[in-house]
Image: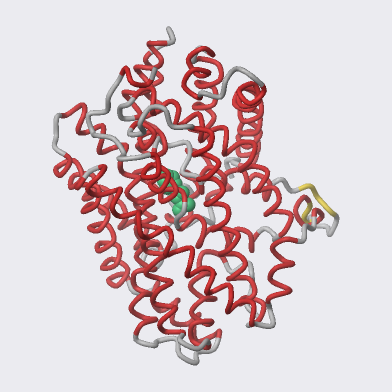
């Protein structure tokens, strides 16, 4: 069935090209930078376990749904959703789902690029031996000084955005495909080398038990003001939301990538591969970072700076540290790069389809807009660190602009996008169409998928929102 439409933007040259590109989109800062620090903030093992369950029962079915919609619609998310909605006899307003995704991608990229800029900057710092022999305090101090300098952050943010635009402008085969082919294997190898180092530290046992030994008490309860135990759903919900972010779901990136997928490729099998690789990288990153954290007496709950304050310590003390450190930050930049191109791809395809622009122009326009918006994040780490955009809400009154953008996109927009995708694939699209496109047959596998997107995902996401509504009180 999927041969009936063709994408005007081209197609992946093979199934593997798609797998690499989608894995490139999924594996990024979310795995190596964010996963360890949110695991640290949420108490470790039990959080990881819940995260794994969320990937399995929510992430995987939604990823299948997103690839399926993309391949069937073969256009930008807005046009795909409109076409498929009309095909199913539903209103064309479903195109709004595409719009929300484009907005989410834009907002995420605006701060993603700033953090990726940190990785870029750290390539050079490690290479010149800035961290050689440093203490934990020294490394933390270097990081704080780095954040306090808006011009430096701006420079690296600009460089990263230019890199992203260069690849996007070159298109599906010439740009995206070439870039991911060599970065994924490289990243994996360097993580294994770092794991070797982590094994040699005396923090390894503690690090691994922090990551894998579940303590459900710490996960589900916190101490109330009067010292009593109160129920705290926060970590469970964070795990669920992170499943969307880390798999690039809910904003159309995977949908657009799916729209370049040749017909006849098994959606289920490719999804398992992508989700498996993504999870493996996140766990490896945790197994590298936490031993270093414990061996050096650092706090696992240090927040967004965790990676940049723990790994440089290791590089400063291990043999060949400058070499491995440089390599690590190069690969981290690559991982971020292959994700950033997917964040902006839906918007670019839309400009090309609906405004007749060529890719180059569309990429430049989106890149400049997103770069400009990124200035908010750059300044939120220094000159505007006290600025609060929504001080009237309890939840937001302690959040800097960067924290707010992260919250709105990763915690609200992506799960909402995922919910709508699940509802569309499960309830709006005719089952003959989804059954045909997924090529699972009409047996147990298909029924399981259908039950997950029809019931499990919507219920889980609605619970997240009910919770969010309860905590967003006007103060
Ligand atoms: N999955 C990417 C990461 O883990 C981030 C991302 C989110 C990319 C949404 C595209 C879309 O870093």
- Asked if one can make out residue 41 in the rendered structure from this viewpoint, the answer is yes
Q: Residue at x 27, y 54 (%)?
A: 164
Residue 441: x, y in percent?
57, 20
Q: Is residue 210 left or right of residue 160?
A: right
| Residue extending farthest right | 228
The quarter in which the N terminus is drawn is: top left
Q: Is residue 329 above or below residue 140?
A: above
Total labels drawn? 0
Which of the two residues, 319 or 408, is positioned nearer the viewer here?
Answer: 319
Q: Quadrant of residue 44?
A: bottom right
| Residue extending farthest top | 89
- Asked if one can make out residue 405 in the rendered structure from this viewpoint, the answer is no
Q: Is residue 227 left or right of residue 195?
A: right
Q: Residue at x 34, y 73 (%)?
A: 121
Residue 249: x, y in percent?
48, 39
Q: Quadrant of residue 349?
A: top left
The way the protein has been coloured in the rendering is secondary structure
Residue 95: x, y in percent?
36, 22
Residue 93: x, y in percent?
38, 17
Q: Residue at x 73, y 74 (%)?
A: 205
Q: Is residue 367 left or right of residue 342?
A: left
The quarter in which the C terminus is drawn is: top right
Q: Is residue 397 above or below residue 357?
A: below
Q: Residue at x 36, y 53 (%)?
A: 338
| Residue extending farthest bottom | 133
């Amino acid at each position: 069935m999927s041969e009936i439409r063709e994408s005007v933007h081209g197609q992946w040259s093979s199934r593997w090209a798609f797998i690499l590109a989608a894995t490139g989109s999924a594996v990024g800062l979310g795995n190596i930078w964010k996963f360890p620090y949110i695991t640290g903030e949420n108490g470790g093992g039990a959080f990881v376990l819940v995260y794994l369950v969320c990937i399995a029962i929510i992430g995987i079915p939604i990823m299948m749904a997103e690839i399926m919609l993309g391949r069937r619609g073969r256009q930008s998310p807005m046009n795909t959703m409109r076409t498929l909605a009309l095909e199913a006899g539903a209103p064309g307003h479903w195109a709004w789902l595409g719009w929300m995704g484009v907005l989410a991608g834009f907002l995420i990229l605006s701060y993603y690029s700033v953090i990726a800029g940190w990785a870029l900057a750290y390539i050079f710092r490690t290479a010149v031996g800035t961290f050689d022999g440093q203490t934990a305090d020294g490394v933390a101090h270097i990081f704080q000084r780095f954040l306090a300098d808006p011009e430096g952050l701006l420079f690296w943010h600009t460089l990263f955005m230019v890199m992203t635009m260069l690849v996007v402008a070159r298109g599906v085969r010439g740009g995206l495909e070439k870039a991911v082919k060599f970065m994924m294997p490289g990243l994996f190898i360097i993580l294994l080398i770092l794991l070797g180092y982590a094994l040699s530290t005396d923090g390894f046992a503690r690090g691994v038990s922090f990551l894998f030994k579940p303590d459900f008490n710490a996960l589900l309860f916190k101490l109330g003001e009067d010292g009593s135990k109160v129920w705290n759903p926060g970590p469970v919900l964070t795990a669920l939301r992170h499943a969307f972010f880390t798999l690039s779901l809910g904003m159309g990136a995977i949908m657009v990538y799916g729209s370049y997928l040749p017909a006849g490729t098994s959606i289920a099998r490719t999804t398992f591969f992508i989700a498996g690789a993504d999870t493996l990288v996140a766990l490896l990153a945790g197994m590298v970072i936490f031993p270093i954290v414990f061996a050096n007496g650092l706090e696992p709950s240090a927040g967004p700076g965790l990676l940049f304050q723990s790994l440089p310590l290791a590089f400063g003390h291990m043999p060949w540290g400058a070499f491995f450190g440089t390599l690590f930050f190069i690969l981290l930049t690559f991982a971020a790069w292959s994700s950033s191109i997917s964040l902006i791809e839906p918007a670019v395809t839309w400009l090309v389809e609906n405004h007749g622009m060529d890719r180059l122009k569309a990429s430049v326009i989106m890149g400049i807009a997103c770069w400009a918006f990124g200035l908010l994040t750059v300044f939120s780490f220094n000159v505007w660190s006290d600025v609060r955009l929504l001080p009237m809400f309890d939840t937001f009154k302690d959040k800097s602009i960067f924290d707010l953008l992260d919250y709105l996109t990763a915690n609200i927009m992506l799960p909402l996008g995922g919910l709508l995708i699940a509802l569309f694939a499960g309830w709006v699209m005719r089952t003959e169409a989804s059954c045909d496109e997924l090529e699972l047959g009409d047996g147990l596998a298909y029924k399981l998928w259908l039950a997950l997107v029809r019931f499990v995902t919507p219920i889980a996401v609605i619970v997240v929102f009910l919770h969010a509504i309860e905590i967003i009180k006007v103060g």
